[in-house]
Image: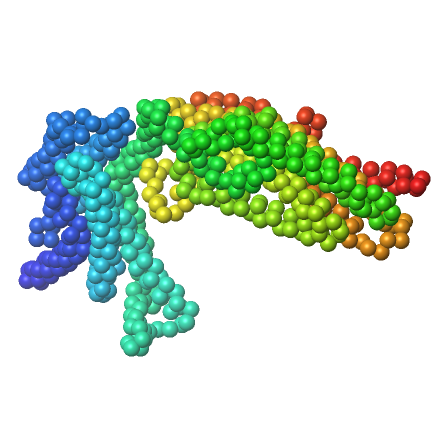
Amino acid sequence: MEEVKEGDNESNEEKKNASSSEKKKILAIFNNFKLEYFIEYCFGVYRFRSIDGELRPPNWKMKAYGFFIFFLYSALFFWLLFFVPDTEAANSSEQSDLITTVDSIPFFVVLFQYAALIVSTNFFSSMNIRMITLLAEVDKTLQLEICTDFYKKMSSRLSKFLIFLTISHVINGLVDFITVTDRAWALTVFPLYFLQRFEVFVFCAYVIIVNGRLAVINNYLKEFNQEQDKKMVTVFTVKDTKIKTEKYFNYIGRPSIRNMKIRDLATTYDNIGEFCFMMNDVFNFQIFLTLYPTTYVTRYSYFKAKKIEASITMEAEKEDKKKSPGEKKKIADESEKQIVESINIIIFIEYIHGIFRFSLVNEKLRTPDWKMKAFTVFIITAFVVLFTTYFVLPTDITHYDNENYVQTADKVRVIILFIQYAVCTFTASFLVNSNNIRIITTLANLDKMLQVEKSSNFYSKSRWETYKYMVLVVISQLATSILDFVAIGDVAWAIAATPLNFIQKLEIITFCKYVDFLRRRLLMINSYLKTFVDEQDQETTTVFTIRSRTMETTEKFNFIGRASDSNTKIRDTAKMYDVIGQICTMVNEVFNFQILTILMSTFAFIIIIMWTSLYYYRSAISDLSLLMNVIVSSFFWICYVAIMSIACERLLLVRNETKILVNKVIMNYDLPKTMRVQAKAFMELVEAWTLRIYIYDMFSVDITLMLKFISVATTYLIVVIQIFNFF
C-alpha cells in the first residue's frame, strides 16, 4: 500500500509540474502580447482573461464595458453628424458637402467593424483560448526555454511594428486635424481608425508567431541534417565569442530505433497547422470587414472624387461666367499685349519699311490711319524713282559686254525683289488689315480659353523664338550684303538692294512666326489631352495624390479633370481646336499672295543661276564674284523656302499627334459615354481642319513642297541646257 501511495504522489507531482510548466508557457506567450492585449482592453475588446496563468473567458463586467465603449462612440458619432451644427455649413458649396459625405462613409464601416469585433471576441472567446494553449504545447514540445532570447526577440519585433503603426497613425491624425475644419470630428474618428489598423497589426503578429515556430522546427531539422552529412556527434558547437556566439541545439539527437523526435516535430507541425486553421476562423470575418469595405470605400471615394473635381470645374466655369465683361475684356487685352510684344521687333522693322499690318493706339489694335498709308506710298514711290533713275541715266549697264551681262542678271534679280516688295507692302497695308487684327484678337481669346496665364514663361519663350529668327535673318543678310558690295562695282546699287532682301526675308520669318503661334497653342491642347490620357491609363485607385508644388506644375496641369458625365472639357478643347483652324485660314488668306510671289521669285533666281553658270562656263571670264553673289543669294532664298516648309510641316505633325490622342480617348470604353461622344465630335473637327497652308488651292506648303521644287528645278535645268546649246 505504501508503494501505491508513493506512486500516486509521484504522478501527482508530475501533473503539478506539467501544469506549472504549461502555466509558465502561457504566461510567457501572454507577456509577449501584453501590450497588444492592454490596448485592446482599453477599447473593450477582450479575447480572454488571465488568472494565475490560466486563461478564462471574459466575465460579464468586461462584456458590459465593451458594449458601453461601443455605444459611447456610436452616440458621439451620430450626435456630431446630425445634431451639432457646422459653422461653415451655410457657406459650403455643393462640392464641400459631397466631400463631407464621402469622408463620413468610412467611419460607418469602421463603426460596424468595431461592433462585430466586440461581439466576436467577448462572446466567442473559446477559440482564442484554445489558440494560446495550443501554442503553449508547441513551445513545450520545441523546448523553447533553452532559447533564452526567443521571446525577447519576438517581443522586440512586435514592438517595432507597433511603434511604426503608432507613428503613422499620429501623422495621419495630425493631417486630419489640420485639414478638417471640424476638430471635434477629427478627434472622434482618431481612436477608431487606430483600432482598425491595430487589429490588422494583431493578425500580422499571430502570423509572425507561426513563422517563428516554423523557423525553430527548420533549424532543428537543419542541424540534424548537417550533423549527419558531416558525421559529427557533438551536441554543442561554440564559435569564438569575440566574433559571433551561436549555439546549435541538437533537438533530434543521434539516430536510433528508439528516437521518436522526428515524430514529435511532425506532431508539433500538425499543432501549428491546427493553430493556423483556428487563426483563420478567428480573423476570417474580421479580415473580410477590413478588406471588402475598405476596397469598396476606396473605389467609392475614387469615383466621388471625379464628381467632386467635375463639380469644382463647373463651379469655376460659373465663376468665370459671373465675371463682368470689363474683367474679361481686360484679360483679353492683356493677352493681345503679350502677343504683340512677342513680335514687337518684327512690327518695328516693318514700320520702318512702310508695312503697317495694324496700328497700336492706347494699347488697342486699330487699322492703319491715312498717315501710315501715305508713308507706305511714299516708300514704294521712292524705290520706283530710285530704280527708274538707274535705268534711265547712262551707266555701265548700257554696255552689254561679257561682264555687263552677269551684272544685268543680278540686277534683274533685284528688280524682281522690288516688285515682290511693292506688292506685299501694298497688300499688307491696304487690303488685309482687318484679317491681321482678327488674328491677334482671336489668338488672345484662344489664350484665355487655354488658361495660358497659368504658364508664366509661355510668352517669354515666344519672344525668345522671335529673337532666334531675327538672328538668322541678320546673319544671312550680312552675308549677302557683303557679297553685293564686293561683287557689284556700283555701291549705291548694292545699298538700294539691301533693304529689299532684308524685308522679304523678314516677311518669310513673320509667316513662320504666325504658324508657330498656332503650333505652340496646339501643343498646349495636346499636353492637356496627354495628361488626361495618362491619368486614365494609370490603373490606380488613389483618391488623393500630393506632389511637390515646385515641380513642373504647368506641364502637368490637368485641364480636362476627372472623367464624369458632367465633364465637358473635351468639348471645350474641341472649340479651341476649331479656333486654331479658323486662325490658320486667316493666316493663309493674309500670306497667300506673298508666299506665291516668294516661290515665283525663288524659282526665277534658280533660272538666273542656271543661265549665269552656263554663261560663265562657255565664256572666258575670270572674275567669278558676280556668279558667287548670285549663287549665295539664291541659296539663302532656297533655305528660307525650306524654313517655311519645315514650319508648316511641324504644325502638321502636332496636328497628327492631336488626332492620335483624341483617338485614344475615343477607344477608352471605361470613360463615360458623354465624354467619348465629345471626343468623336473632336475627331470630326480634326478631320475637317487639316491645318494645311494652301497657295490658292494649287499646292500645300509642307516638306513635300521642297521635293516638288527640286523636281521642277531639275526639269528646267535640262530645258535651259538644251536651249543654251542653240546660242
Report the residue at 72% width, 45% height from top: 493
Vertical comparison of 221 with 129: above or below: below
Residue placed furthest toward the right:
726
Residue 64 image position (x, y, % from top left): 7, 36
Residue 257 image position (x, y, % from top left): 34, 63
Quarter of the image where the C terminus is located? top right
Name the quadrant containing residue 691. top right
Report the residue at 14% width, 37% height from top: 184
Residue 480 image position (x, y, % from top left): 69, 49
Vertical comparison of 694 with 474: above or below: above
Is 129 placed left or right of 494 in the picture? left
Is 105 placed left or right of 409 in the picture? left
Quarter of the image where the N terminus is located? bottom left
Name the quadrant containing residue 239. bottom left
- In the image, 691 versus 374, the foreground residue is 374
- In the image, 86 versus 331, the foreground residue is 331
Residue 273 visible in image: yes
Report the residue at 16% width, 52% height from top: 35
- In the image, 491 versus 646, the foreground residue is 491
Report the residue at 12% width, 57% height from top: 20
Residue 443 visible in image: no
Vertical comparison of 675 with 158: above or below: above
* Colouring: rainbow
